[in-house]
Amino acid sequence: MNIIVCIKQVPDTTSVRIDPETRTLVREGVPSIINPFDMFAIEEGIRLKEKHGGKVIVLTLGPPQAEDALREAISLGADEAIHLCDVAFKGSDTLATSFALSAGIRKIGAFDLIICGKQASDGDTAQVGPGIAVQLNIPQIIFVRRIEEIQEGAIVVERISEEGFDVVRSALPALISVVKEINQPRLPSLKGKMKAKKAEITKWGIAEIGVDPGRVGLDGSPTWVEKIFSPPEREAHEPWHGEPDDLVKKLADELEKAKII
Amino acid sequence: MAWLEVVAEKCVGCGACIKACLYDALALEDKLAVVKENCTLCGACLDSCPFEALVMRKTEPPAQVAESYKGVMVVAEQKRGQLQSVSYELLGVGRRLAEDTESSLSAVLIGDGVDSQAQRLIAYGADRVFVAQSGTLGLYNDESYAAVLTRVIREQKPEIVIAGATCIGRALIPRVAVQLQTGLTADCTGLDIQEETGYLVQTRPAFGGNIMAMILCTRARPQMATVRHKVMKALAPDENRKGEIIRVALDEKELATRTTVLKSVEEAADTIPITEADIIVSGGRGMGSTGKFSVLFELAKALGGAVGSSRSAVDAGWVPYAYQVGQTGKTVQPKLYIACGISGAIQHLVGMQSSDVIIAINKDPEAPIFKVATYGLVGDLFEIIPRLTQEIKSRKMQ
Amino acid sequence: MNYFLTEEQQFIREISAKIAKEKILPVRAELDEAQEFPWEIVKVLADSNLFGVYIEEKYGGTGGGVLDLCIAVEELSRVCGGISLCLAATALGTFPLILFGSEAQKQKYLPGIAEGKKIVAFALTESGAGSDAGAIQTTARREGDYYVINGTKQWITNGGEASIYTVIAMTDKARGSRGASAFIVEKETPGFTFGKKENKMGIRASATRELIFQDCRVPVENLLGKEGQGFIVAMKTFDASRPGVAAQALGIAQGALDEAVTYARQREQFGKPIISFQGIQFMLADMATKVEASRALVYAVARAVDRGETKIAKESAMAKLFASDMAMQVTVDAVQILGGYGYMKEYPVEKMMRDAKITQIYEGTNQIQRTIIASHLVKEQAGRK
C-alpha cells in the first residue's frame, strides 16, 4: 500500500529554558526536530509498509532546513521524501498549509492512506490533518490509537474519546491522525543514517504543485497573528525551607485559613 | 506578500530579538538585526525588541468580509443524548461576546432524541437553538456532522462560531472551517471583541506555552475558535429563560458517510477524572517508581481529590497517560493543585497554572515549579506528604 | 575536543547517545537493582546496527573498526557501564573470530552477530586461572571429528545469555601455554551448561556466570586458528579489545563528571552554588583533564589498531590501565562532590563508582597491564642494545 506521512519540523520546545535571573524565556539555540507527534505517524507508516508492502512517502512544507526532518524520516525507513519549499508559503496558517499540502498530495498521485501526527508541538492546532482530508475529499479518522486491520479498501481503527475509545471503519483512501499510544517509535539506525545522507529529496514550489500564490502564505491565510506576548506570571511566594513537621503545620494552617480544608 | 522588517533607524543592534527566535532566523550584521531566509513569520520576536524596531509588514488584499454575518453561535456537544459540560462553558463566553457585539447567541445541537437538551442550552444562555436530529446522527460522525453544521452556518451566517476543543470538536471544527474557507483558532484561552474593529481577538498559547499569541481572522467569516474544557466558566442556569428552538431540515445526501462507528467503548476509571476534580495531587520524576505513587493516592483520598502526573512519570510508565497534566496531556483548573516532585517544565505549567492555589513540594529550591506556586515547600516529598496526609486527616476529625 | 571523527563515527556517537538517554537512562537503576540482563536494550542496539560497527560490510556490519566500537561503548557507558557491556563483551568474544576465524567460520557466525541476533561471550578465566592464564584446567581432547571439552569457566561476562562462546581450553597440557587452543562453542551444545549467576558489586545489569563443560563435543571445524594457538588468540584478542574496556571506563568517568558538574552548579551552600568554591573547581578541573587525557589515548590506540598496527600490546595495555584507574578516581571524586546525596542510590554516581571498579580488574588486572607494559620496556631497550 502507498502511504503518505505528513510531517513538520518544529523547534524543540522542551529545550526552551527560563533565564533564572530575568525569568524570561531563552529561545536562542533551540534545536529543530521532527514534531514529536509525527514520529508516531512515521513509525506507523513504516510498520504498515513492513506488514503490507508498498512504500512510505514523507511530505513536509517548510523552510529550506526542513530537509533535515525529511532525511531523518528516511533514516528511520521512509522510502521517498518531498519538500514543499517556496518563499510564497511563508506565514501560511492552517488553512493555507492544508491547501498546499493537499496540492502536493494530488501531484504525488495514487495513495491508500495519509498519516499525520495528532498535532504539531509548536502550534498545537491539530487542524491541518482534517484540513487535508476535506481538501482531498477523503474520509478522516482523528486521534487513532490502534490500527485493528486493513482489508480490501477499508481500515478499522480505535480512535480515542474522552471516555475511552470508538472502533471506527473507514473506506480507503483515508486520512488518519495518530496519538502517542499507537506505537513506540524506533530510533534511527546507522545504516539508515548513511542512506539518508545520500537520499534524493524532491523539492516542489508553488509552480510545481500548480497553486495560486494568493491561496498560500499570508495572503492565503484568513487568520493573522496580531500580537505575541509572554504568558503572564502568577503571583508566587518564596518557597519555605525547614523541618518537614514545621512545613506541614505551616501549610495546613494556610490551607485552613484559605478554607480549602 | 508579507515580511518581517527591521526598522534601521530604531534598531540599536542589541541582539535581544536573536534570543527570542526559535528558528535561528535573525542575525546581527554591522550592528543591525537582519532577517534570514528561514524566517517563518511566526512573530515570536516582535515583542522582544525594546525599541520597537521589528515590524511585521504585509500588503493587505481588499477586505472580503461580508457585512451580513451577525451573531454568535455555539456548537453544543452531546454524547449518548447528554450535553457535555463544555457546552455550558461555551455559552458562558458566547453570551458575553453576543452582548459585546450587540447581537444574539445561538447554539447548534446535532444528535438523536436531544429535544430536552435544547431547553437546557436556553437555560444556560442561548437565544435560539438549532436542533438537527436523526437516527443516523446519534453517534458522532465526521462527515455527516460537518455537512450539517456547515450548512447551518452558511444559512445563519453567524459572525463568530465557538466550539469545544474536545476529541469531537478537534475532528469536526477544522473540517467545517476548511469547507467554509475561513480561519480557525484552536485552544483559545481568551476571547474578546476588539473595540475599534469589532474583530474577535483570539488569545492562545503557542510553542508549548512559551508564548501567547493574539490572533485575528480579518479576511473571512465566520471567525471560528475552539476552547478547551474548563477554560471558560458557565453561567448559572436560569430555567425561566425563554428562547426559540428551531428544527433543522435534513437532506439525505448530507447524512451519507464513508466511515462507520462499529462500537463505542467506555474505559472505566475508578477515580474522579482529573479534569473534573477540585483538588489534584500530582507526581513527577521525583516519585521514582509506580509503587511510591501510593503516598499521593493517600493524600488525594484524605483531601477528596484525584491523582495526576507530569509527562515524565507517564513516560517512565509509573502511571497511565490518563493522569497526565500539561501540554500533551489534560488542562486542569482545580481549586487546589499539589505538585510533588515535579520540576515544572513549561509544558507542565501550561496545563495547570490557572489552578486557584498551587502547592509545590520539591527537593530543588531552584525548580521552576516554585515560580508559579502559591506555597512552596523545599524538602523530601516522602517526608512531607505522609505528614501532610496525617495532619489533614486529624484536622478534619476536629 | 574535536577528534576529527568520520561522519559515520559521528553518527555512531549520536545514535548511541540517543539510545543511552531515551532507552537506558529510564531503566538503568532498576536493572542494576534487579541484576537483570538488558534484553530490550540489546534489541534496540541491534536495530540501530550498533552490534555491527566493527564488523566488515560483507558480513553484514557497517565496516568500521575498534574506534567505532569504542565510541559506541563510551557513549552507552556514560549512562550505564553495566548495560553497555552486552555490546562490549560481545565484541570481546567476536574478536577471536575476526582475527583468527576461517572464511567459513566468519560466514557462518559474523552476520548473526552483526545483526545483533547473537550475543557472544569470551571464556578464558577459571577459578584457579585469572591473571595466571597458563594455569587453565579446562581440556579439549580430540576424538575423531570432535573435540571433547571438560572443565569449568568462571566469571564469564554474557554467560548464559550469549548464544556463541569462544572458549580457551588445553589441547596439550604438557606444552603449557603452547598447548592451549580456542574453540567456538554454541549454546545448547550437549554437555555445555551454566552454573550459578554471580551477585556483583557493580555492572549488575550484565550477566556473569559459570560455564560448565562435561564431555561437551564440539566439531573440529569449530577450532579457531590452529591447535596450540589458543594463547596467541587470547593475547591478540585482548590487544584489540582493551581499548573497548578503556572506552567503557572513559564513558563511566564522563558520566560521573557530567553529574558532578550539574550538581555543583545547582547545589547551594553558604548562599552560593558550590561550583563557585575553588576547592570544588579544582576537583572538577582535574577530573575533566584526566577524562580528556584518557580519551586522547584510547582513541589514538583504537585508531592505530584500525590502521593495521600489530605491535600494539603495550599501548593497548596503557589505554586500559590509564582509563580504568582514571575512572575509579573520577567516580570517587564525583561521589565526594555530591556529598551525602552522592552516597545515596537516588543519585547515579554511587553506581558509577561501583561500575568503575571492575574496569581495573577484568580483561587483565591493572597489575597485569603494568607487567605487560614493563616487559615491553625491557624488550625495547634490550632490542636496541
Image (spheres, grey):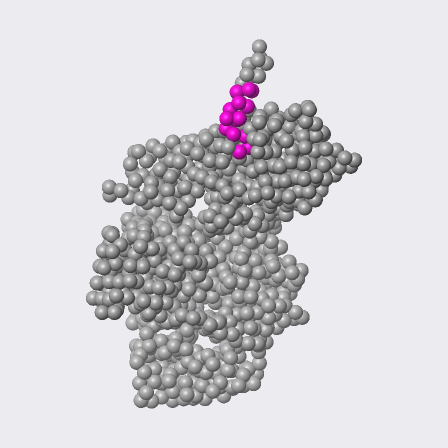
Quick one: B294 or B181, which is closer to the camera? B294
Residue for point 54% across, 30% down: C364
* Relative to B236, A85 lies left or right: right
Residue for point 46% across, 35% down: C357
Residue for point 31% across, 79% down: B235
Question: Where are the magenta residues, as a range?
Answer: C362-376
- Relative vertical location of residue C371 with respect to residue B188 in this rendering, above or below: above
Question: Which quadrant of the structure image shows residue B169?
Answer: bottom left
Give the quadrant of the C terminus of chain B.
Answer: bottom left
Q: Position of residue C28 (x, y in %)?
A: 47, 48
Can I make out residue B300 in this image?
Answer: yes
Quick one: B326 or A173, which is closer to the camera? B326
* Relative to B179, C90 lies left or right: right
- Relative vertical location of residue B71 with respect to residue C319 in this rendering, above or below: below
Is B344 within the magenta? no
Q: Position of residue B21 (x, y in %)?
A: 39, 52
Residue for point 37% across, 85% down: B120
* Relative to A4, B247 lies left or right: left
Q: Position of residue B191 (x, y in %)?
A: 34, 71
